[in-house]
């Protein structure tokens, strides 16, 4: 796990490191969408990304936002639920 960074430092790093990659990804999506893809799963994924572009890019606008929602749900991943929970040692 990385040490916590100040939101301004995180935002600066995102704009330097992540923004060019995100921009290239959406440029590729726009180019591929214009080609009229025949593969439905790929076309659906590209359509989803293009429709959710603003939400998917939001982490570039605010250094307080996490890259992923995995960290808050990590505690749920520590202990399985359902049938497998009976195999998990009690805490």
Image (cartoon, helix red, strand yellow):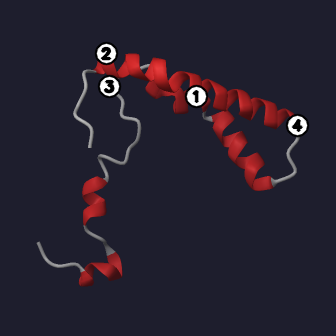
Q: Which residue is mark 1?
A: 21
Circle 3 crowding by C-alpha within 10 Å: few under 14, some 14–19, many from 20: some
Q: Quadrant of the C terminus?
A: bottom left
Q: Which residue is mark 2?
A: 8
CB of mark 4 within 8 Å of CB of mark 3? no
CB of mark 1 within 8 Å of CB of mark 4? no
Q: Position of residue 41 (x, y in %)?
A: 74, 55
Query: Against 14, is 4 above or below?
Result: below
Extreme residue in the left direction = 91
Q: Earlier in the sequence, mark 2 or mark 3?
A: 2
In front: label 3 or label 1: 1
Q: Which residue is mark 4?
A: 35
Real-space Cα distance between discs 3 and 1?
20 Å
Real-space Cα distance between discs 1 and 4?
21 Å
Q: Which residue is mark 3?
A: 64
Q: Earlier in the sequence, mark 4 or mark 3?
A: 4
């Amino acid at each position: 796990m990385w040490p916590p960074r100040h939101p301004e430092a995180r935002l600066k790093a995102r704009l330097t490191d992540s923004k060019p990659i995100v921009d290239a990804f959406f440029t590729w999506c726009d180019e591929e969408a214009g080609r009229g893809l025949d593969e439905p799963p790929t076309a659906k994924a590209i359509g989803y990304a293009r429709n959710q572009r603003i939400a998917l890019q939001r982490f570039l606008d605010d250094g307080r936002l996490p890259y992923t929602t995995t960290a808050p749900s990590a505690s749920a991943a520590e202990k399985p639920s359902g049938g497998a929970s009976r195999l998990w040692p009690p805490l």
